């Protein structure tokens, strides 16, 4: 136990969810006769659920400041619907369409953030209104008809990395490259952490826990790389997954390494104390809500890209039950991603 | 088994990972007495009471508890409450939005045929409130009561559980003088009814006033016990046992090095944001010089805190006029951020409510008011953060395992040191300390006093707001008195005494 703690850190409870996830995978792999741990299943899981985790990134911050955003599904639907309609009617290139979706998200977020931060109306009420408004907006502008999106956008929701290079690797070389980059970055981070370990406290840590950690992570990433890369030809680690990974790294930096992130936690922990420490509480509220809606727009793009069309209310909102992202907001991010990310980038 | 003891805790040892919180502590409490337990912050008083009340279940500590002659095995709080041991925590644990009746019978509802018998509950509540001398409607919502009244409701709640031993953890720390007296009188009344009280307190005058026996705990060990009635106890003796050394003077020696005027305020007026027309500060004018400690004396509600928070970025009330000069230059400060930029720091009186985010670690708290200091290329630098917090941990002697533990695990004195560190890290020129030693034991107070002197010697202008007149007389170089929002007097500390100050605090001169 002592040695396990040396490798994983003092607080083992934070790994409960990792263990639960591993157990689930094993149970269902047995129950499905080996269909769980296959390339195509994992590829589908990632590209089919990336949008939920994108929402979770923003929802984590919203929940931390003690608010709630009920409108994410409607904002995502509205942003992607506007994107689909403008792209179709004006023949806009795909990147302009994406920009439009993000701007819509930003405006929606500013609208809701304004009510929360300036008028002091609770997020629950504000976003309940937002949910109705944007849901109605989707039905209104689309006349309840699905609108197909430019094929380039499908790449964001269901695309794969390109094939290149030699065939003897037996897998998608882009995925292989990503896996190698991830392992190298992790090794560098751990080595840096090791060399700096005694800088402040004067106590140099032993090297072996770092070696074991590197070993475990290398095996896990290596296996995942093989799993994602060795599917049927033309498939790889999915694009939405790649977008998700980039966003996770970005939001880790925002929540842990910027003043804004600190302010979010300060406001959530004790609003009055935060105010007396010079935190602009209203500004923190505003930008947290703004950010949530922008991420909702991103999620909308991923979702629409996968289903190849922006759908009207019934189809879309059935899948976007507002409760969906909350349960996923705190749980996976806090339990699974945060501890590993903390280790991963603490040295940077 | 010796006679006359209702409660005996024998050789209690409790260890947490890495820390021995209690070692071989023995506590014997006589029936129908008031037993005081005192000790420095972190000495183990609260841990001992948590062992007694079953918060730490039987088996998680070594030693035995005998209650009314029988060995007790408490697995949780319910067990100890059933036996008749009830603890009232320092932070009140009632639900503010519910009524007195609902709170008193919370978890113990009088149920008939599956429904709560409200009539009976209200009747019993009225009887219980009568016992604690509280004449209020049982339907009153808790949040509409004052802290003193809430405390009495807590005691009434304890009485509803057929309490035999009532444990009060720092019962008067948040009460004003008359409420405190009221509570102490009630404890004497309970004693007459045969209820034993165990009181944890820092206030030595209260201990000597009401208790029969005092047990002193230091560093997790019982140091000494004194019977009060025998007249063997004096305050200095307790203090000595608590800190393990003689404190000849409760306030450290200090020769002020006073320089130029740093802060000058004139005509400062603030209106109450909730009650139009009511002025919190009227035409206040004062100045503070570098290296000077200026005390502000006033009764509760006199407007001391309101004035200070208004100076600190118009944080309270509606600003109605006034000028502020820092270093001779007039400044207009409209937000806390600007106040911090102008080198003002404010340590609030309500440490837990306004000073700390209790979810944060020591490391994050210390840097939280000056994040720009720990940035490298726009991102927070954890190495700088750690270095800064370690520095303050060492120089202020914050007692903790390491700086990554939560501030909620610290004792009051250490929490206050963390708050002070946080504001020292903003490198202020003007430091406003609002009740900096409230709820802190004698030893930690002395350390904080020394720290205030050090800061003054570095040329900082220090404003010390305090309800304790001896503290102001012992620490300040000059004292202003406030009454009903108006500054009523200014006096050099050397020429002042408690009577003079009290007079100016109660009469508009």
Image (cartoon, rainbow, N blue to C red):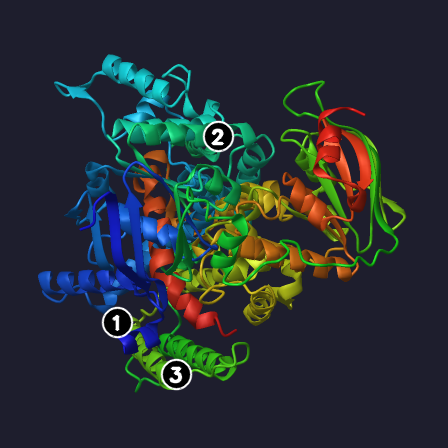
Q: With B363 as the anchor, is B305 left or right in this view?
A: right
Q: Residues within 10 Å of mark 3 (few under 14, many from 20)?
A: few
Residue wearing tag 3: A165
Q: Position of residue B415 (x, y in %)?
A: 52, 54
Query: What chain does mark 3 sit on?
Result: A
Mark 3 falls on what kind of element? loop
| Pointers 2 and 1 in contact (C-beta within 8 Å) | no
Q: Earlier in the sequence, mark 3 or mark 1?
A: 3
Along the line of sight, which residue is nearer the eye, A110 or A82?
Answer: A110
Q: With A26 as the anchor, is B282 left or right in this view?
A: right
On whether disc 2 and disc 1 are found on a single subunit, the reply is no
Q: Residues within 10 Å of mark 2 (few under 14, many from 20)?
A: some
Camera sees residue A132: no
**Between tags 3 and 2, which lies in front?**
2
Residue wearing tag 1: A231
CA separation in Å, label 3 and label 1: 17 Å
Q: As displayed, is residue A325 above or below residue A198?
A: above
Mark 2 falls on what kind of element? helix
| Pointers 3 and 2 in contact (C-beta within 8 Å) | no
Q: Position of residue A223 (x, y in %)?
A: 27, 76
Residue wearing tag 2: B147
Along the line of sight, which residue is nearer the eye, B14 or B112?
Answer: B14
Q: Position of residue A230 (x, y in %)?
A: 27, 75
**Between tags 2 and 1, which lies in front?**
2
- Residue at 73% x, 43% y: name it: B295
**Between tags 3 and 1, which lies in front?**
1
- Residue at 44% x, 43% y: name it: A76
**What label sits on residue B469 in the rendered view?**
none
Q: Position of residue B74 (x, y in %)?
A: 20, 48
Mark 1 falls on what kind of element? loop
CA separation in Å, label 3 and label 2: 75 Å
Along the line of sight, which residue is nearer the eye, B96 or B379?
Answer: B96
């Amino acid at each position: 136990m002592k040695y396990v703690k040396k490798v994983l850190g003092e607080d083992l409870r934070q790994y409960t969810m990792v263990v639960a996830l591993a157990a689930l995978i094993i149970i269902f792999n047995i129950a499905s006769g080996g269909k769980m741990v296959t390339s195509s299943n994992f590829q589908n899981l990632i590209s089919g659920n990336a949008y939920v985790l994108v929402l979770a990134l923003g929802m984590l911050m919203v929940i931390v400041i003690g608010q709630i955003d009920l409108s994410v599904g409607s904002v995502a639907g509205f942003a992607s619907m506007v994107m689909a309609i403008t792209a179709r009617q004006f023949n806009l290139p795909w990147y302009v369409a994406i920009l439009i979706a993000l701007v819509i998200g930003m405006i929606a977020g500013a609208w809701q953030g304004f009510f929360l931060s300036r008028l002091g109306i609770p997020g629950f009420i504000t976003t309940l209104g937002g949910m109705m408004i944007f849901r109605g907006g989707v039905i209104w502008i689309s006349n309840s008809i699905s609108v197909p999106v430019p094929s380039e956008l499908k790449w964001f929701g269901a695309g794969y990395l390109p094939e290149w290079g030699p065939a003897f690797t037996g897998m998608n070389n882009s995925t292989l490259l990503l896996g190698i980059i991830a392992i190298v970055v992790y090794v560098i981070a751990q080595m840096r952490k090791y060399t700096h370990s005694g800088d402040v406290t004067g106590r140099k840590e032993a090297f072996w826990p770092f070696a074991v950690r590197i070993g475990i992570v290398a095996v896990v990433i290596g296996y995942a790389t093989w799993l994602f890369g060795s599917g049927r030809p033309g498939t790889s680690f999915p694009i939405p997954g790649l977008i998700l990974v980039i966003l996770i790294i970005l939001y880790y930096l925002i929540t842990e390494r910027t003043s804004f992130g600190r302010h979010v936690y300060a406001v959530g922990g004790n609003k009055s104390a935060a105010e007396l420490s010079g935190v602009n509480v209203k500004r923190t509220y505003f930008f947290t809500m703004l950010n949530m809606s922008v991420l909702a727009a991103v999620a909308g793009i991923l979702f629409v890209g996968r289903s190849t069309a922006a759908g009207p209310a019934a189809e879309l909102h059935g899948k976007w039950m507002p409760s969906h992202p909350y349960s996923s907001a705190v749980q996976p991010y806090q339990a699974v991603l945060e501890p590993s990310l903390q280790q991963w980038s603490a040295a940077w | 088994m010796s006679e006359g003891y209702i409660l005996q805790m024998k050789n209690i040892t409790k260890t947490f990972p890495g820390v021995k919180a209690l070692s071989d502590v023995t506590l014997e409490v006589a029936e129908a007495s008031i037993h005081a337990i005192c000790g420095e912050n972190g000495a183990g008083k609260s841990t001992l009471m948590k062992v007694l009340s079953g918060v730490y279940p039987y088996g998680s500590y070594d030693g035995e508890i005998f209650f009314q002659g029988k060995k007790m095995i408490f697995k949780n709080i319910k067990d100890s409450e059933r036996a008749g041991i009830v603890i009232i925590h320092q932070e009140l644990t009632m639900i503010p939005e519910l009524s007195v009746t609902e709170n008193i019978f919370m978890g113990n509802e009088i149920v008939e045929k599956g429904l709560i018998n409200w009539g009976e509950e209200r009747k019993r509540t009225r009887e219980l409130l009568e016992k604690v001398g509280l004449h209020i409607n049982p339907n009153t919502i808790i949040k509409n009561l004052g802290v003193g009244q809430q405390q009495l409701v807590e005691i009434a709640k304890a009485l509803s559980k057929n309490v035999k031993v009532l444990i009060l953890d720092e019962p008067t720390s948040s009460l004003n003088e008359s409420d405190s007296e009221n509570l102490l009188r009630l404890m004497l009344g309970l004693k007459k009814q045969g209820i034993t009280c165990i009181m944890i307190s820092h206030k030595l005058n209260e201990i000597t006033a009401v208790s029969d026996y005092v047990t002193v705990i230091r560093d997790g060990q019982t140091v000494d016990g004194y019977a009060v009635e025998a007249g063997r106890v004096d305050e200095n003796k307790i203090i000595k046992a608590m800190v393990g050394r003689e404190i000849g003077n409760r306030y450290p020696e200090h020769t002020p090095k006073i320089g130029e005027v740093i802060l000058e305020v004139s005509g400062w007026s603030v209106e109450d944001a909730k009650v139009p027309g009511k002025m919190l500060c009227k035409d206040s004018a004062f100045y503070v010089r570098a290296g000077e400690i200026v005390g502000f004396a006033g009764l509760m509600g006199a407007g001391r805190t309101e004035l200070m928070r208004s100076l600190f970025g118009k944080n309270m009330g509606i600003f109605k006029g006034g000028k502020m000069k820092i270093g001779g230059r007039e400044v207009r400060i409209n937000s806390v951020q600007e106040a911090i930029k102008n080198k003002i720091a404010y340590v609030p009186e309500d440490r837990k409510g306004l000073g700390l985010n209790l979810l944060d670690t020591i490391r994050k708290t210390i840097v939280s008011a000056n994040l720009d200091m720990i940035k490298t290329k726009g991102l927070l630098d954890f190495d700088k953060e750690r270095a800064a917090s370690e520095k303050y941990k060492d120089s202020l002697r914050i007692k903790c395992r390491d700086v990554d533990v939560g501030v909620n695990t610290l004792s009051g004195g250490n929490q206050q040191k963390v708050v002070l560190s946080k504001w020292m890290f903003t490198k202020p020129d003007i430091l406003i300390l609002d009740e900096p030693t409230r709820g802190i034991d004698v030893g930690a107070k002395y350390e904080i006093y020394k720290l205030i002197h050090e800061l003054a010697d570095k040329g900082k202008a220090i404003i010390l707001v305090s309800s304790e007149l001896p503290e102001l007389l012992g620490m300040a170089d000059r004292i202003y008195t406030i009454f009903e929002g108006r500054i009523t007097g200014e006096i050099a500390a050397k020429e002042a005494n408690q009577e003079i100050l009290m007079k100016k605090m109660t009469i508009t001169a």
